[in-house]
Image: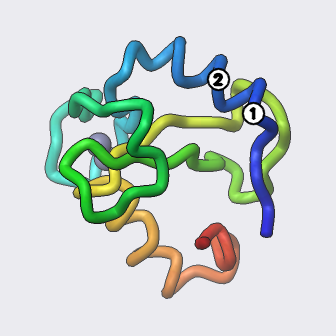
Amino acid sequence: MSEFSDRIVEEAWSRSGGACECNHPDHGHHNRCGKTLLKAYRGDKFSFFGWEAHSKSGLYIDELTDCEIVCWDPCFLTILEKAKYSTNEKSAII
Ligand SMILES: [Zn+2]
Ligand SMILES: [Zn+2]
């Protein structure tokens, strides 16, 4: 499984200010999602505060520019849903 290094995730988390960084136009939020997240809930898809370190490129390039802090619901779930139909983003999943 591909993953970012802890350092990159740490830096991305700092950059995010503890809020979803997603600004994808198809997710039903306007501009940046900005959902409040809690650091301890990384990977917790059942928590309201759950989040993931998402690779924008799908390749998990270990750089801050490729790492995006996204909330599970709706953003990461939407991303996973889309990935089912796209070969580019396959296996960006746990
Ligand atoms: Zn979000
Ligand atoms: Zn989103």
Against 32, is 41 above or below? below
Find residue 21 and report its horizontal and vertical position in percent.
40, 30
Find residue 27 and report its horizontal and vertical position in percent.
24, 54
Number of labelled discs? 2
Dot 2 crowding, Cα within 10 Å, few <14, some 14–19, many 20+? some
User: Which mark, by number, is residue 80?
Assistant: none
For image coordinates 28% across by 28% down, the residue present is 32
Q: Quadrant of residue 77?
A: bottom left
Dot 1 and dot 2 residues touching (CB under 8 Å): yes
Q: Quadrant of residue 31?
A: top left
Q: Amino acid at mark 2?
A: Glu
Q: Residue furthest front?
A: 40
Residue nearest the observer in this picture, 88 or 81: 81
Residue nearest the observer in this picture, 82 or 48: 48
Q: Amino acid at mark 1?
A: Asp
User: Which mark, by number, is residue 10?
Assistant: 2
| Residue bearing the label numbered 1 | 6
Q: Report the side of 37 relative to 65 (left or right).
A: left
For image coordinates 74% across by 27% down, the residue present is 8
Find residue 93 and report its horizontal and vertical position in percent.
59, 72
Q: Report the side of 31 relative to 86 (left or right).
A: left
Find residue 20 and report its horizontal and vertical position in percent.
34, 33
**Disc 1 on helix, strand or loop?**
helix
For image coordinates 68% across by 77% down, the residue present is 91
Distance from disc 1 to disc 2, alpha carbons, whole Å, reads: 6 Å
For image coordinates 60% across by 23% down, the residue present is 12
Q: Quadrant of ligand 1?
A: top left
Q: Quadrant of residue 34?
A: top left
